[in-house]
């Protein structure tokens, strides 16, 4: 988390692009539905999606350094 904070601090990405509003809504819906498999799958998809976004941010960080 500390490293992620440093990268974000240097790159200063648009927060709406980095972690768009509503990004957790499918996870919340899956949890509230009582379906643990759907919740797990949705959380996995979220993690992959956020990871891909952060990889782009980290690439910008390396270019600035």
Image (spheres, rainbow, N blue to C red):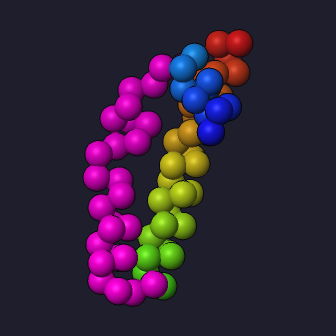
Residue 47 is situated, as x and y percent measured from the top left of the image, at 54, 57
Is 32 displayed left or right of 2 in the figure? left
When the figure is inspected, residue 22 is found, relative to residue 61, above or below; the finding is below
Residue extending furthest front? 2
Q: Residue furthest top?
A: 65
Quarter of the image with the N terminus is top right
Residue 14: image location, x then y, percent = 39, 26
Part of the protein shown in magenta = 11-36
Residue at 43% across / 81% down in the picture?
Answer: 38
x, y percentage for residue 60?
60, 23
What is the quadrant of the C terminus in the image? Answer: top right
Q: Nearer the viewer, residue 43 or 56?
A: 43
Q: Is residue 10 magenta?
A: no
Vertical arrangement, residue 44 with respect to residue 56, above or below? below
Q: Is residue 22 left or right of residue 45?
A: left
Residue at 35% in and 53% down: 23
64 on left or right of 19: right
Q: Quadrant of residue 42?
A: bottom left
Figure quadrant of residue 2: top right
Q: How many marks?
A: 0
Q: Is residue 65 above or below residue 59?
A: above
The magenta stretch spans residue 28: yes
């Amino acid at each position: 988390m500390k490293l992620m904070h440093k990268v974000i601090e240097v790159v200063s990405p648009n927060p709406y692009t980095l972690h768009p509003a509503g990004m957790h809504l499918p996870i919340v819906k899956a949890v509230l539905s009582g379906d643990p498999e759907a919740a797990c799958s949705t959380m996995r998809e979220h993690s992959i999606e956020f990871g891909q976004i952060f990889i782009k941010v980290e690439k910008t960080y390396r270019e600035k350094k």
